[in-house]
Image (cartoon, helix red, strand yellow):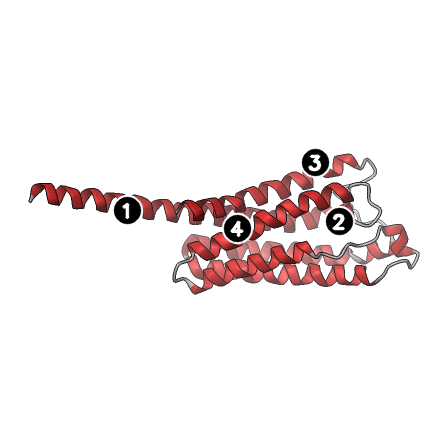
Amino acid sequence: MKARTLLLGCGIASALLYAAMLVFIPLLWPAYSSASQTVSELSAIGAPTRALWMALGLVWTATYGLFGFGVWYAAGSRRALRTAGILIVAASALGIFWPPMHLRPLLAAGGGSLTDTLHLVWTAANGVLTLVAIGLTAAAFGGRFRIYAIATIVTMLAAGAMTSLAAPGVQANTPTPWIGVWERVNIGAWLVWVLVLAFELLKTISEKRLARDLHGVSGRRIEIAI
């Protein structure tokens, strides 16, 4: 029980850490705009915030991966939930090897390279893994959680589509007034899902522990009565 609780707690830590990175790291780059620039630009080659983002990103990767193991561990016989845990671990593994992009001026000048292409591939792969994982948790829990998970998927798809429509402006180094907003809506929906899933599983563990304790007390009372 303690191991599962700690692992699921890593999910809460990972979501809070990533949210903090989104809020505070841009403050170290005065020219950066969270509303009109992508999150990836914070870790772009040559960005003044790259070193800090990469360092904290490794911590996030570790905590998110441990959360995936926690989901798998807490799933029990629920196959959909176990698979979701595996996909979370896979998504965290992508984070270790995530290829960086170059800054906009270099991309517009034709200085992009294979790493920029792979960056887009990694982004798409991570999106698929995350959406499928959310869908699997919807199937595993049902009820209100299913409705919430479906709403999360719809939100992420809509925000992701809006981000994609503005993405060519990054390559061309033209204004992208809302790209950062849409991308952060997408990321925010994912982070909230991580928190909700972690608390839902922690609640399930707590209820099982309470039921076990009550059963133990009832058993002792019967023995005393006899």
Q: Earlier in the sequence, mark 1 or mark 4?
A: 4
Q: Could you tell me how far apart the alpha carbons at marks 2 and 3 are, in whole angstroms? A: 15 Å
Residue 104 in the image, given as x and y percentages of width and height: 86, 51
Residue placed under numbered mark 2 in the picture: 38
Closest to the observer: 127 or 7? 7
**Contact? badges 3 and 1 (CB < 8 Å):** no
The label nearer to you, 2 versus 3, is: 3
**Image label count:** 4
Q: Say which element carries label 4.
A: helix
Q: Amino acid at mark 2?
A: Thr
Confirm whether residue 195 shows in the render: yes
Closest to the observer: 7 or 28? 7
Q: Amino acid at mark 3?
A: Phe
Q: Say which element carries label 2.
A: loop
Q: Earlier in the sequence, mark 4 or mark 3?
A: 3
Residue placed under numbered mark 1 in the picture: 211
**Other-residue count near label 1 (Cα within 10 Å), few / some / many at <14 / 14–19 / ≥20:** few
Q: Earlier in the sequence, mark 1 or mark 2?
A: 2
Q: Could you tell me how far apart the alpha carbons at marks 4 and 3 are, in whole angstroms? A: 23 Å
Q: Could you tell me how far apart the alpha carbons at marks 1 and 4 are, in whole angstroms? A: 25 Å
Q: Is residue 159 left or right of residue 131?
A: right
Quarter of the image where one finds residue 19: top right
Q: Amino acid at mark 4?
A: Phe
Residue placed under numbered mark 4 in the picture: 67
Which of the image's four quarters has the C terminus? top left
Q: Say which element carries label 1.
A: helix
Q: Could you tell me how far apart the alpha carbons at marks 1 and 2 are, in whole angstroms? A: 47 Å
